[in-house]
Amino acid sequence: MLRLPPFTYHQPREIDAALRIVADHGPEAMFVAGGTDLYPNMKRRQQVPSQVVSLGGITELHGISGDPASGLRIGAMTSLTELEENAALAAAYPGFAEAVASISTPLLRNMGSIGGNLLLDTRCNYYDQTEEWREGINYCMKCEGEICWVAPSSPRCWAVQSSDSVPILMAMGAEVILRSPDGERRIPLLDLYQDDGIQFTTKKPGELLTALLLPAQDGWQSSYLKLRRRGSFDFPVLGVGVYLRMDGAKIAELRIHIGGIGSIAHAASDSAAALIGTVPDRESIRAAAKAAFKPTRAMDNTDHGAAWRKKMAPIFVSRAIEAALARNS
Amino acid sequence: MARRHVSTRVNGEPVEFLCEPHQTLLDVLRDELQLTGTKEGCGTGDCGACSVMLDGRLICSCLALAAEVEGAEVRTVEGIASGNELHPLQRHFLEEAALQCGICTPGFLVAAKALLDGNPDPTEREVRFALAGNLCRCTGYDKIIRAVLDSAAELRGEA
């Protein structure tokens, strides 16, 4: 049976109080939002903070404000179920709503927050295991060890970006607000992530992600398509987010990000460039989607075979583009 | 580490207990309050055996800290029946053999009750998606889904 390690638990009511606790304790302290990612990791001893700072009691971090015409602000502690059940959000940002509804199960969407999903730890078959299992292989470089077991000659970690919301939000050009004792900064999600399984975000130690900002919804359309073993429950092993805007029959703007198949949700820029300014049809979409094969970095560290997942990337890109176009008409 | 004093309500009854910060709600329900109907499966949120309702929301009690339920309303499988009379869900699970080893059953009952409380007339697809977080390794799910749909029909007065 898995048990949590002992820790001191803090329940601040204000953001500044939460930031102070983490500043005082340094790397020994971690924020916890819904707990659905951190607590399993703590039970498996992948993360063992001695100070856990709950964000649940901070009212300012909850709720949605604004409107789609000028952009939405979503507090980091807003639950995934609240987002899933918000009809106005689903109408204005269907790709984002689709991604949120596909995260995990009803139980965990009730507990999990959007902020936690944005900062979901990267995943790997050699990392998401019990302490005993990992000790048995002498650990890996993401936690306590020196080697990457999926690519033993690699100097870097290849754990996989596994949040469903991230690829579509990156395509949408969404932003986040990060707060520290020194103040606040607002950055695009594109600048929040980096291509490394261990240091997968640019968030500084002690910074708190307080809100997600969705762009004004003027004529854009979106979709998210996810590959997983079970249709109702599983992390993505490939997740394609598409965001586009038409100019008459032509595609004026198109952005595609592919998650679940590398340590960052890569842009499929060549596929997008091939379609911008054209009148798309089934053939041209399929031809353009082929360019999505190259930037995907599939390794044998998730469910399903790496070669098959990579082969599926262009197919999912073309299907996701078609789904967004169908919404537009 | 200082033990915390928590006042809460479990199945409508006021309850007080002391807990360590690292004890989960599941730990306290089973080990301190002797409510052993709620089961521990994976302990990591995958299986749903520990499903309970917290302030009307279905959650995994293995991933909720006991210290977080101060002032809250917890409902467990023990609170589903009315006295000695089984809830229609429990009766249909028995009558339609929607269980074998039984370890997932309390979680399924709580999750199914959470679904029917909010949606009295779910489609089969809605039932399947609502119960996606509850794993059963024996029945193959078909009997469980049918038992939930039949319970829903009875609760609507259609059976």
Image (tube, coloured by chain):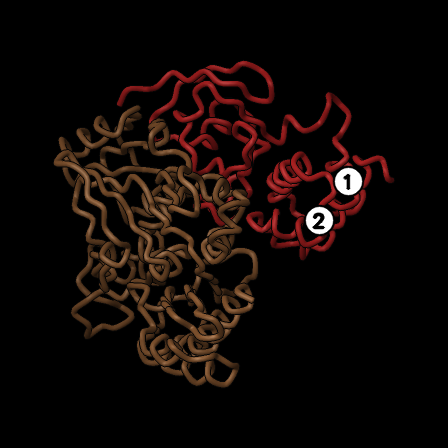
Chain colours: A brown, B red
SS at mark 2 in the image:
helix
Specify the subunit that label 1 lies on: B
Nearest the camera: A181 or B39?
Answer: A181
Q: Three-letter amino acid code at disc 2?
A: Ile
Q: Three-letter amino acid code at disc 1?
A: Ser
Instruction: Indicate which disc, 1 or 2, sits on the residue closer to the N terminus.
Output: 2
Residue, x 34% and y 25% (percent of image)?
Answer: B20
Nearest the camera: B152 or A48?
Answer: B152
Residue, x 51% and y 15% (percent of image)?
Answer: B15
Q: In the image, is residue B114 above or below residue A202?
A: above
Tell me which corner region of the image, top left, top right, bottom left or bottom right, holds residue B37.
top right
Residue A272, how many percent across, how many down?
Answer: 36, 75
Residue A96, how many percent across, how many down?
Answer: 45, 54
Q: Which residue is mark 1?
A: B151
Residue, x 45% and y 39% (percent of image)?
Answer: A111
For the N terminus of chain A, give its image quadrant. Answer: top left
Disc 1 to disc 2, C-alpha distance: 11 Å
SS at mark 1 in the image:
helix
**Mark 1 vs 2: CB contact within 8 A:** no
Q: Which mark is residue A6?
A: none
Q: Which residue is mark 2?
A: B144
Q: In this rendering, does residue A214 appear at all?
A: yes
Residue A324, how many percent across, how many down?
Answer: 50, 66
Tell me which corner region of the image, top left, top right, bottom left or bottom right, holds residue A164.
bottom left
Residue, x 36% and y 27% (percent of image)?
Answer: A59
Q: Is residue A282 left or right of residue A30?
A: right
Q: Residues within 10 Å of mark 1 (few under 14, many from 20)?
A: many
